[in-house]
Image (cartoon, rainbow, N blue to C red):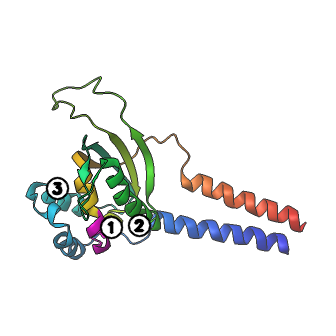
Amino acid sequence: METIVIWLGALALYVAFRVWYGGWRGPLTQAEIDAYLPRLPESARQNAKEVATLREFLARDDAREFAMLNLVRLAPEPVPHPETGELLPAMTLLEVYTRDFVRALLRKAGHPAIAARAIGGYLDSWNVEDDPGWTIVGYMRYRSRRDMMELVTDPRFANSHAFKIAATANTLSFPTSPRILLFVSPRVWVGLVIALAAALLHLALG
């Protein structure tokens, strides 16, 4: 009986994780889109072209996960702290924003998939602007477009967003739909961890 309880509990835990990690709320409605856009940070609302691009992306919501590719060039010289004015390295200020954002992202089943430091300029390029000197490449997994909008319109990030703006000299972001992922997905390793814990408990009680 104990064995059945252990493995049924493990199965229930994994199913609960899959529901949370995968999401279940369906595509965004037009009413939701119309409500989110006016709540964007003022700096984002000022760029009419990007707002139109965002609206189109939200209107084509398929309720599936996606990953945001982020290219960031940090300011090369120390920049003023948004609150104190103290000159600090740009990376120090960016970490203030990143810490708050990643915590909130994790609560919504999102997470960094790749974070890397650039170690060279363009080695292969056609008909693009000159490399501004990107500093960081990030690849962030979002459970849904709704989660993304809830994060970027959360007023709790209003203060920390100023740190991102102060630290960043250039940035470029666009959403992607992963096709080939060679790293182990949480869908796999979380299941393996739960199974291992259940097996160890089974052995301990057996």
* Residue 55 image label: none
User: Which of the two labelled residues, at mark 2 and mark 1, occupies the earlier sequence position?
Assistant: 2
Q: Which of the two discs, 3 and 2, sits closer to the camera?
A: 2
Which residues are the magenta region?
150-160
Q: CA distance from mark 3 to mark 1?
A: 18 Å
User: Of helix, strand and loop, which one carries label 2?
Assistant: helix
How far across and down, in percent of the image, does residue 67 sit? 37, 51
Q: Main secondary structure of the magenta part?
A: helix
Which residue is more in the foreground, 40 or 78? 78
Q: Position of residue 14 (x, y in %)?
A: 62, 65
Crowding at label 3, few (<14), some or many (≥20) Cα neighbours within 10 Å? few
Quarter of the N terminus within the rendering = bottom right
Report, in whole angstroms, how far the alpha carbon at label 3 lies from the one at label 2. 24 Å
Q: Amino acid at mark 3?
A: Thr
Give the residue type at disc 1: Leu
Q: Residue at x 75, y 67 (%)?
A: 7
Residue 69 seen by the camera = no
Residue drawn 9% across the image and 59% down it: 48
Between discs 3 and 2, the one toward the N terminus = 3
Magenta span contains residue 156: yes
Is residue 17 visible to us here?
Answer: yes
Q: Quadrant of residue 149?
A: bottom left
Alpha-carbon span between mark 2 and mark 1:
7 Å
**Which residue is depicted at the point 77% across and 70% down?**
6
- 194 vs 71: above or below: below
Residue located beneath label 1 in the image: 151
Q: Which mark is residue 53?
A: 3
Frontmost residue, 80 versus 205: 80
Mark 2 sits on what residue? 104
